[in-house]
Amino acid sequence: MNTNTITYIALGSNQGDKLANLNLAIAHIYKRIGKIVAISKIYTTPAWGFEGEDFLNACIEVTTRLTAEKLLHELLDIEIEVGRIRIPQTGYQNRIIDLDIIFYGEEAHDSNALQIPHPKLAERNFVLYPMSDLAPDLKHPVLAKTIKELLVTTTDQSEIAPISAELKSIKLPKIDYTYVAVEGNIGAGKTSLASMIAADYNAKLIKERFKDNPFLPKFYEDQNRYAFPLEMSFLADRHQQLLDDISQYDLFSDFVVADYDVYKSLIFAKVTLQEDEFGLYKKVFDIMYKEQPNPDLYIYLYQNTERLLENIKKRGRSYEQNIAPEYLEKINKGYLNFIKNQQQINVKVIDISDLDFVNNRTDYLNLLERISEK
């Protein structure tokens, strides 16, 4: 999964309802590209390089998981959706909407299709002024000057003035909880979702330390022999990790999101252990987790077995490749039985079998809406 990259995008319009065009473009960017972090003032500027109506220009700061090339592709599609018709001719021309990548992280990119930072930004007041609103101290990776320094030295003498109107900022759905646990079967996507929420909401992320467990590969080879030591080691490690991590945070003020909940230990143990082993295991569990805080929201991501197997194959962990469908179905039944009998935990079960929230932002936003609903 790609991590968030900060990108700055310039917007311009000199045809039709210019303000509405800019707002519509921002709405599309939010839905298809990423979180809108900040929006500059709107500036009116004369047409640059050709005769035409004055432009309205602005810049926005966005966090995105798209690559630079994919970002460009999406922006071109958004221009078409807003109504831009590209006329095959040389030189500048009137346009309903114009969207340009100004910066993409700290990356300098130079190809036939894409140049980052934008090669003309140091010569254009209609980019420098709104960029100065957002990031005056941002340094150009090639010119080695900040935006405010480029604004002083630019050769562009065109008139530019801010207007009183403001562009509409679109916010992510509000998640009104302080401690959220994301749970699911093996390969359901719980770590991906928890990581994405933590990045977009500036939350503290707690990730399960499962990769370091030496019993896990052995368990998938011989479940009967290694089930008890595996579950006991997970129990001890999860307990210690939650003590270490949760103690760092104030659960009344910090937003904490975890990709597991302590009760998963009981759920997996119920499936993998013999009855007498589980009895002993539960006694130890009850002692260790007697004072452990419960999450404000427990999210269970349900995926059908076929999708789970596809995801497991795709992520390529060698010791998981021979997991039987029957084992996944038992784990799912264990979770659903646990959830059905819960009284003290606020639970949401969300079927994501037909969603791809990692690669499809629309699916991700829909999932956030469902999570935020009371």
Image (cartoon, rainbow, N blue to C red):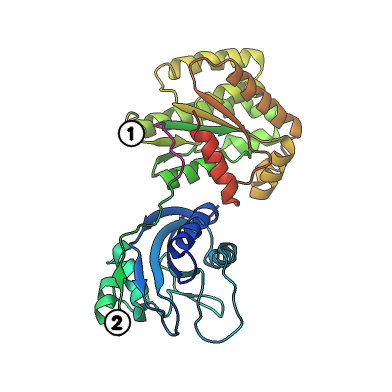
Q: Label 2 sits on what residue type?
A: Thr
Residue name at image x 41 percent, y 81 percent: 48
Q: For numbered disc 1, what is the local secondary structure?
A: loop
Q: Residue 267 at what x, y percent from top left?
A: 60, 23
Q: Label 1 sits on what residue type?
A: Tyr
Q: Residues within 10 Å of mark 1 (few under 14, many from 20)?
A: few
Q: Residues within 10 Å of mark 2 (few under 14, many from 20)?
A: some
Residue beneath disc 1: 249
Task: Answer yes or no: is residue 3 visible.
Answer: no
Of labels 1 and 2, the one closer to you: 2
Q: Residue 368 at what x, y percent from top left?
A: 52, 40
Foreground residue, 93 or 149?
93
Q: Which residues are magenta?
A: 172-178
Q: Residue 18 at what x, y percent from top left?
A: 45, 65
- Check the image and report above or below for 169 versus 226: below
Q: Is residue 116 magenta?
A: no
Residue name at image x 32 percent, y 32 percent: 253
Label placed on residue 154 = 2
Q: Is residue 177 magenta?
A: yes
**Mark 1 or mark 2, earlier in chain:** 2
Q: For numbered disc 2, what is the local secondary structure?
A: loop
Foreground residue, 182 or 274?
182
